[in-house]
Image (cartoon, grey):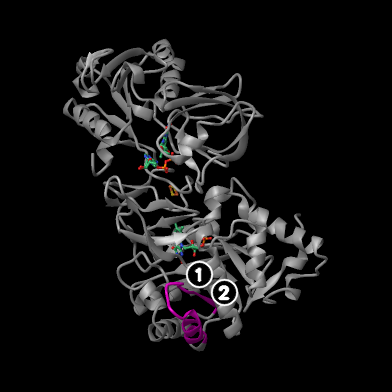
Amino acid sequence: MKTFDKRLEVKIKGINLKNPVMTASGTFGYGEEFSDFMDLSDLGGIIVKGTTGTHREGNPYPRMAETPSGMLNAVGLQNKGVDVFCETVYDRIKSYDTNIVVNVSGSTIEEYVEVAEKINALEKIPAIELNISCPNVKKGGMGFGTDCLMASQVVEAVRKVYHKTLIVKLSPNVTNIVEIAKSVEGAGADSLSLINTLLGMAIDAEKRKPLLSTITGGLSGPAVKPVALRCVWQVAKNTKLPIIGLGGIMNATDAIEFILAGATAIQIGTANFIDPAISSKIVAGLSEYLDRHNLKSFDDIRGII
Amino acid sequence: MKKYCKDFVVVENIALTPTFFRLTLQYPEKLPEINPGQFVEVLIKEGADVLLRRPISIHDVDEDKNQILLLVQIVGKGTQALSKIQSGQSLNLVFPLGSGFPLRGEKVLLVGGGCGVAPLMHLSRAFNNIGIKPDCLIGCRNQEQLFSTKEYSDLSNLHIATEDGSCGIRGLVTNHPILDKKFDTIYTCGPTPMMKAIAKEALKRNIPCYVSLENTMACGVGACLCCVVDTKEGHKCTCTEGPVFLSTDLKDF
Ligand SMILES: Cc1cc2nc3c(=O)[nH]c(=O)nc-3n(C[C@H](O)[C@H](O)[C@H](O)COP(=O)(O)OP(=O)(O)OC[C@H]3O[C@@H](n4cnc5c(N)ncnc54)[C@H](O)[C@@H]3O)c2cc1C
Ligand SMILES: Cc1cc2nc3c(=O)[nH]c(=O)nc-3n(C[C@H](O)[C@H](O)[C@H](O)COP(=O)(O)O)c2cc1C
Ligand code: FES
């Protein structure tokens, strides 16, 4: 049997992670897509694709454009809906030796509640990540994550039906992320993950056309890391909830910067596209950092900035 | 099919025209089975500020030497940087990706234009291996843009259409009389307008036509859903369910 570095274990309200490294929703499929490249049990957790009440086709092609040190996407929550997840996908992935977290999305409070309730019934899913920050859908999505009242209403409603660990994923597209974080904390969230993508756009000057079918899309990758670090740091200083930091993490050093800013765990997104085994390499990099700095765990340096 | 993420060593980088180059890449182990029409995702580490890997078709495979060949057209900063790579340097690939061309029928026509001619070499070889010599039709602007005609002729009956008539017939591939021969299947890869025109000709003649799409991709493994094409059954991933599709399954064809 494989042994894991005990020093890396962390807890997020009710769930134990064997290490702080999770993969970000929408960038790692259902995990299966990456099993040829790495041992999925190396991971602290896998956050699967955004799941909605019913099947969604998502936005038209083109949905992706590379930008300096980053990429824009406008996938628009394409997924087969929560019932297909529960009936077929769940059976395929439930035996992975890691925490499988479902990213729950919707257009209305009722839709979020319906999805959360159905996922609550799945024994092997210890947590959901409520996505109130998707910039790529016309209705709902980011709308819930950019308004304190709407954010707390949707979290409260989901809290009533969801009895396991409730993570809420915040949008950086706000003037004051601390206000939103506090509303969500007050509404009963167990943990916060931040950040989702930044709203951006790209234009082809020669063709005089936008590069995305939706004109605007979500920016991710190294370009967003400074914004993500700032958000994590501000929220860590002003709420008591454990934070999962993400945005532009490409290697173990980036991950450690998020821990120093106050994150309990981290997620890897766009980096999975460049090196499909990067998440497991980052786990190894974290152990190596502890060795090199003679630390017993990251508890001694978490949030010291 | 199992996928790999591994370093290859560049054996040779040949400029075929001012904008096309061919890389011969050595795999350090026994190559896994690769189907014609499958592609790789190339990591471009040096010489350009590119973040994502670039999808490139597998041009040909030398199973005895464990080498694969890529045929690349310089269109932007990634392909420009890749054109500078030298023999001895390593190149990291995720491979083999996508589903590839199904081998159907005995009388088959392969139609390529631009960098779309790339996968047709491996496809021709696959047909040769089962005792079928395909017809291959290549279209380009003029004679200067033609390359590898000997290699294509070795594996197929080669037909050429140039826009200025400097080689083969004058005109577009759709003007070529070979299209009027009786075929069981047509395969095409190239610029979208060309593939659409060929698919239309195939449909008129009631011949199944497989097209190979070049949608922009981020992950190449079916995880990001960036590469979708609109099919009669909704959005499908070009990287896992394609890049080869039956033209009549696609909405815009
Ligand atoms: C499955 C598949 C197989 C391919 N096989 C080959 C091949 O064998 N040989 C080859 O030369 N090219 C092939 N391509 C196209 C190749 O991926 C692009 O040309 C390349 O990604 C461009 O990168 P760049 O950094 O040079 O261009 P960028 O700087 O990213 O862009 C420059 C210009 O190229 C265009 N472009 C960018 N990406 C693509 C794309 N995916 N398809 C078409 N145009 C694009 C853009 O519109 C832009 O105007 C394939 C694409 C796919 C999806
Ligand atoms: C192609 C793509 C699809 C995404 N889909 C989702 C999604 O369904 N739900 C979600 O909460 N976030 C989604 N995200 C956002 C990521 O989970 C992550 O928050 C963001 O990309 C920033 O992290 P990164 O810079 O490490 O990629 C998506 C991102 C990308 C690039
Ligand atoms: S490129 Fe990511 S799903 Fe096809």
Disc 2: which chain? A
Which residue, as the protein is rendered here, is positioned at the far left?
A: B204
Q: Position of residue A301 (x, y in %)?
A: 73, 73
**Span of residues in magenta:** A164-185
Give me the disc on residue A232.
Answer: 2
B76 drawn magenta: no
Task: Tell me which corner region of the image, top left, top right, bottom left or bottom right, holds residue B46.
Answer: top right
Q: Position of residue B214 (x, y in %)?
A: 37, 38
The amino acid on which the numbered mark 2 sits, given as a three-letter code, is Val
Tell me: B140 left or right of B1. Answer: left
Task: Tell me which corner region of the image, top left, top right, bottom left or bottom right, holds residue B68.
Answer: top right
Disc 1: which chain? A
Tell me: A21 left or right of A59. Answer: right
Asked if one can make out residue A113 in the rendered structure from this viewpoint, the answer is no
Ranked by sequence position, the earlier of labels 1 and 2 is 1
Does any atom of ligand 2 lie closer than 8 Å to the CB of label 1? Answer: yes
Q: Position of residue B65 (x, y in %)?
A: 61, 20
The reply to whether the C-beta atoms of the residues labelled 1 and 2 are less than 8 Å apart is: yes
Circle 1 SS class? loop
Give the labeled residue for mark 1: A195
- Of residue A81 and residue B83, the one placed in the foreground of this image is B83
* Residue A134 against residue B251 in the figure, above or below: below
Circle 2 SS class? helix
Question: Quadrant location of the C terminus of chain A?
Answer: bottom right
The amino acid on which the numbered mark 1 sits, given as a three-letter code, is Ile
Tell me: B139 left or right of B133. Answer: left
- Residue drawn 51% across and 49% down? B51
- Residue drawn 63% across and 61% down? A254
